[in-house]
Image (spheres, rainbow, N blue to C red):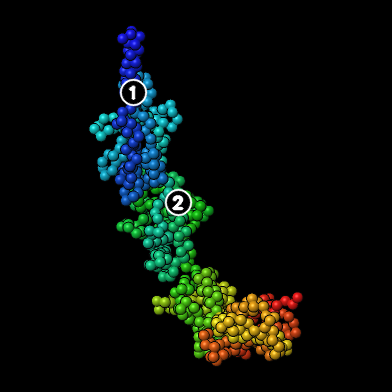
Amino acid sequence: MRISTTILLLIAGMALIAGIILTERYVPSTREAEQSRSFPLTELGEEVDGLEFDVEGVKTVMSRRSGVWFITEPLQDRADPDQVDAVLKGLRETAWIEVIKKEEMGDDEWKKTGLLRPTTRIKLTSLGRTVSEAWIGAPAAMEGTTYVTTETENGGKVHRLARCAVTPLIRSLPNVWRDSKLVRFKPERVLRISLSSAGSLIEMARRPPDGRWALTKPFQTGGRDDAIENFLSTLLNLSVESVSDTELVSPVPDDLAVQDSIEVRLEMAGESEPLVVTLRRPEEGKKTTEAKVSNRAAKFTANSDSLSDLLAQPNDLRDNHLARLKESEVTEITLESVSHPDVILQRQNESWFLWRHGKLEPANSDRISVLLEALNTHRIREFASDSASDLATYGLNRPFLSISWRLADKSSEKLHFGQDTESNVYAKLEKQSFVYKVAAVVLAAFPTDPVKWKGLNPLRFTLFALRRISLQGGSQPAVNLDFNQETAQWSGSIAGQDITAAIDRVKADRLADALSKFRVQDWAQDRSEAIKALATPTLTFTVTLGVPGEPNAPVTQRTVSLAPTQAGADTAIYYGQLNGEPDVFFVTREYLRELMAPVLKKQR
């Protein structure tokens, strides 16, 4: 072998040995690489129930009970859940960059890591067992990184360079970990509220099954849900401005257990003890007051822009609607008045009917919806009286109008309306003693004349029954349009002359469809002038109807007569009458023009 070849092989061998040494020293083993990629907090979840921070000799200990974090050392108070969550999230997101070894670093270099005598320690526990413990050293040269020491399962220690964002969070003083909100609870869990103030007591409770609020003291009535929820919202948004230096042990401080205070007692689902909030009655215009909470030991100064909401009186929290009704649950409505016969409305097969003249006829469902909407949305102007001992003062001893309703569950209620000597309008539910003052404008939604509740489609028919349409204007000869059900063809005549060839089939079909859906604007209460005008109608159309599928069955006729509201003029509103019946309706001129568009072809 040549000497040169021997030298080259020797150099290659030395390089290989050097590479192996460098790899062993600077490239982590498989175990070390795995340790670099994983972090013991990554998989931790709800089992973490204890946190301990030791920063430069100041130790803060927190524990989680029933899902709530509390500071237990060096003070006792509820912890801020947002801050605790931020720390846990930061720990879970901590990333190991590489393992470092003390023996591979010089003394000066190791001293710079801060791991020789670390001043910050983090400890996490679960059911009394330590699940993770770490010592945090100095920041490293790479931005956002620091040196960390953790224990291994066999009691050894591993030093790492880590990307960890929790260091500035945990270096806060213990007092900073206090909850910045005076109380924390989920409003939907509150089942009962007791509000004591200046010797008075207001109690509110949720009613099953819908969870709506009701007042149970000082009287029993429906609660005003938005006002009660706003009251709870004000409580939840009370911010802690400062904390007294002296920790208090008694549940209610002596200097707050006075007449000039507000006590709110909240009973919540799943809790054996109520949450009690005691506040000094805030001075007018002030945004701060002293406060105490039963699950916190200290006395606080609380802040809110809406402290006055906590001074609510019973009338502020009671339901200020006349009724709470769902149309789908109402099966019958009756209006009784001193001026007209009773209006009886019944719902059958999802449709409303009016009982009139001993029979049922289609009712104006839109007007019924307006009535129910008025009952549900009209706001009571004033709670006039909580006693029914003097109904005559409000004209309720002889109501001028009463509205009753029956629900699908067979329950019923009646609402009476009265009027005092100054024309103020009052209302009272028959089963309650309370008297409400209401705006007179609400009465417009409750017309007492039965005719106002008639359906607005008096002519309705099916096209399968149509046999003929006759149109006549004044003294002009009638235009007769005959429809053949078998061929679906139109034929026609005017004064005996055949006009079949001139009929535009599309226009005739459109006219038939429009007449089958003929809709009036409203029904007239005062009919005297209308009857006079309709004695000489300016327009008449008659629909001849048979029985669908039975061409030889007897036919019936429905005739609609129309006249302007002012004789000899083309007025914006026309009177109308069906088959000469006494009821008179209104229809607009524009609607009639669209309805009576020519059905003959245009002549070229």
Q: Residue at x 38, y 31 (%)?
A: 97
Q: Between disc 2 and disc 1, whose residue precedes?
A: 1
* Residue 24 sits above or below residue 501 on the image: above
| Residue 570 position within the rendered picture, expressed as x and y whole percent measured from the top left | 73, 80
* Label total for image: 2
Q: Is residue 7 left or right of residue 525?
A: left
Identify which residue is drawn at 45% across, 49% down: 239
Q: Could you say whether the residue bearing mark 1 is in a helix, strand or loop?
A: helix
Above or below: residue 247 compared with residue 493: above
Residue type at tag 2: Leu
* Residue 206 picture quarter: bottom left
**What element does badge 2 sit on?**
loop
What amino acid is found at the position of numbered circle 1 in the picture? Thr
Mark 2 vs mark 1, CA separation in Å: 61 Å
Q: Is residue 178 left or right of residue 508?
A: left
Mark 2, mark 1: which one is toward the viewer? Answer: 1
Residue furthest out toward the top: 3
Q: Which mark is residue 395?
A: none
* Residue 585, percent from left and from top: 62, 83
**Quarter of the picture holding the C terminus:** bottom right
Q: Residue furthest front?
A: 1
Q: Residues within 10 Å of mark 2 (few under 14, many from 20)?
A: many
**What mark, if any, has residue 23 been given in the picture?**
1
Q: Which residue is mark 2?
A: 238
Q: Determine whether, in the image, residue 308 is placed left or right of residue 99.
A: right
Q: Give the camera-side residue of 444 and 92.
A: 92
Q: In the rendering, at what x and y percent does residue 313 appear?
A: 47, 63
